[in-house]
Image: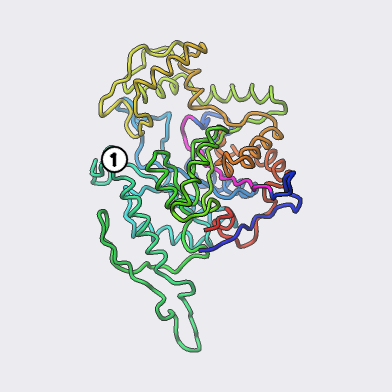
Amino acid sequence: MTTTASTTVRPTARDAAGRPLRQVHLAAHFPGVNNTSVWSDGKAESQIAFSSFRYFAQNAERGKFDFLFLAEGLRLREQKGLIHDLDVVGRPNTLAIPAGIAAVTEHIGLVGTLSSTFNEPYELARQLASLDLLSGGRAGWNIVTTSDAFHGENFRRGGFLDPKDRYVRAEEFVAVARALWDGWAPGALSANKDTGEFLSADALTAVDHHGQQFDVNGFGTLPRSPQGHPVIVQAGDSADGRDFASANAEVIFSLHSEFTDGQRFFRDVKGRLPAVGRHPDSLKILPAAAFILGDTEAEARVRSREVALLQVSPQAAISFLEQLWGTDLGGYDPDGPLPEIDPVLADEGVTRGRVRHVADPVAVAKSWRGLAEAEGLSIRDLVIRFAAKHTFVGTPVQVAEEINRHVQEEASDGFVIVGHTNPTGLDEFVDRVIPELQERGVYRTEYEPGTTLRETLGLTQ
C-alpha cells in the first residue's frame, strides 16, 4: 500500500538550512497497575472501567496523538507463590478495549498488544481486520512473542515452544495474516445493482499455507479496510527482534529513550531496512518516555523525586530486586545496601510471569552493587534509578525542546508517552507540552479528516 504523510504542519516549519523539520509522532500508553503508575494517588481511578479508557483516549485525541497504546497481560504475575498485587492485577481483553474506544473517538489510532505465541493467525487476523474495518482504518497490532511455560499453562501448551522458535513462529504468523488480509483485492465489493454483481470477478485469493507452525487453507472473511491492514508494531529488542522488526514492523516501541543510546538504536534498525527493500521512512521508532513537569526546572525535579517515591514503595523496591535475584529478599531493608548474596539461577525463580530481561543476573547484580556503593544508593534509590526514571523532567518548554531534539537529530521519530496516573496522567502533557511542540511547527495542530493510522503516522510503505 502506498500512502503519503498527511500531518497538518505550519508552512514555516523548516530548519536553518531550509529543510522541512521532521515531525514528532506521539503515542499514548494507557497505564495499568505497575511501578510506573501511582494507583494510590487520590485522583487515580479504575484501570478496568470503560470510563477510564474513554477519558484517556479522548484526552489523547484532544492532544492529537497518533495512537492509543495498550499492553496485555495473559496471566496474573506471581511473586513468592502469591498474586503479585504490586504489579498488573486485572486487565481487560486487549481487543475489547479499542472496539469500544473506536465508537467514542474519530481520529486516534488504536494499537493493542497481542501474542503471536498464544493465538492462531486465522482467528487473530480476522479479529484485527474487523477492528480495522469498523474503525475506518485506525487499528494497529503490537506483536509480542513469548515461550515461557507459565503463560502456556493456560493455553494447553506449557513450554511447547522452544525459545529460539518464538520469532520463527512470529514470522510465519505475520506472513499468514498478511496473506489473509491481502486476499481481498481493492474494491472487491462492487455491489453493482444494475448488473447484479456484488463481488467483483477474481476479487478473492485463497490462502493455501503449509508451514512449520501453521496449516491454513481458505479465504479471509472481510474486505480490506481503508488502510489495507492494521499497522504492524513490534517491541522486541534482541538481535532476532530487530531482524523481525526490520522485515515486518511499521512502528517499533523501544526502550531506548536516552539520547545517545537512541541514536545508536535508530541507526542500527533503520540501517537494516535497505537490505530488505524498505525505505527508512517506512518504519517509525517510538521509545517509551515518562515525564514530570514544573513551572521551573527545580520544581520539576522535586516533583520527580516525590512521584518516584510513590511509584517505588518500600515493598515495590524489594519486589523489583527479587525479580533479578530470584529469591526471597523480604528480610532486607529497602533503605539499606543491596544484598551481598548472588542471584539464584534456578529455572523457576521467585517471580512467575515476568521474563528475566538479562542474560547474566550475577553480572548485573555485581554491577548494581558497584553503582550503589559508588553513589551511596540504597535498594530503593537504585530501583528508582532503573524502574522509575523519568525521561523528561523540566518546564513544558524544556520538555518540548528535548523531545524535538531527539526527533530532529534522529534519536527517535517521537515517543510513546507514559503518564503516572490513570486516567488523567496525560492531561498536563496535552495542556502544556503539546502547544509548545505545535508552536515549533513540529507537531500537527489538527488531524487530517478521514486519514488512516498509517497515514497519520506518515508511513511510506
Image check: 70 left or right of 77?
right
Q: How far from the left and from the top, in percent, is residue 430?
A: 66, 42
Q: Amino acid at mark 1?
A: Pro
**At 55% from the left edge and 49% from the top edge, which residue is drawn?**
67
**At 36% from the left edge and 21% from the top edge, which residue is drawn?**
363
Comparing 61 with 184, the one in front is 184
Q: How far from the left and from the top, in percent, is residue 457?
A: 57, 53
Q: How far from the left and from the top, in percent, is residue 186?
A: 48, 71
Image check: 440 left or right of 191?
right
Q: How far from the left and from the top, in percent, is residue 135?
A: 52, 60
Residue that sits furthest to the bottom in the current view:
194
Q: Is residue 97 visible?
A: no
Q: Is residue 178 visible?
A: yes
**At 73% from the left edge and 43% from the top edge, which residue is drawn?**
440
Which secondary structure is most common in the magenta stretch? Answer: loop
Q: What segment is highlighted magenta in the picture?
A: 21-35
Comparing 283 with 295, the one in front is 283
Would you identify the image quadrant in which residue 260 lies? Answer: top right
- SS at mark 1? helix
Q: List the residue tagged with mark 1.
A: 163
Check the image and report above or below for 34 versus 15: above
Is residue 261 covered in magenta? no
Would you identify the image quadrant in which residue 148 lies? Answer: top left
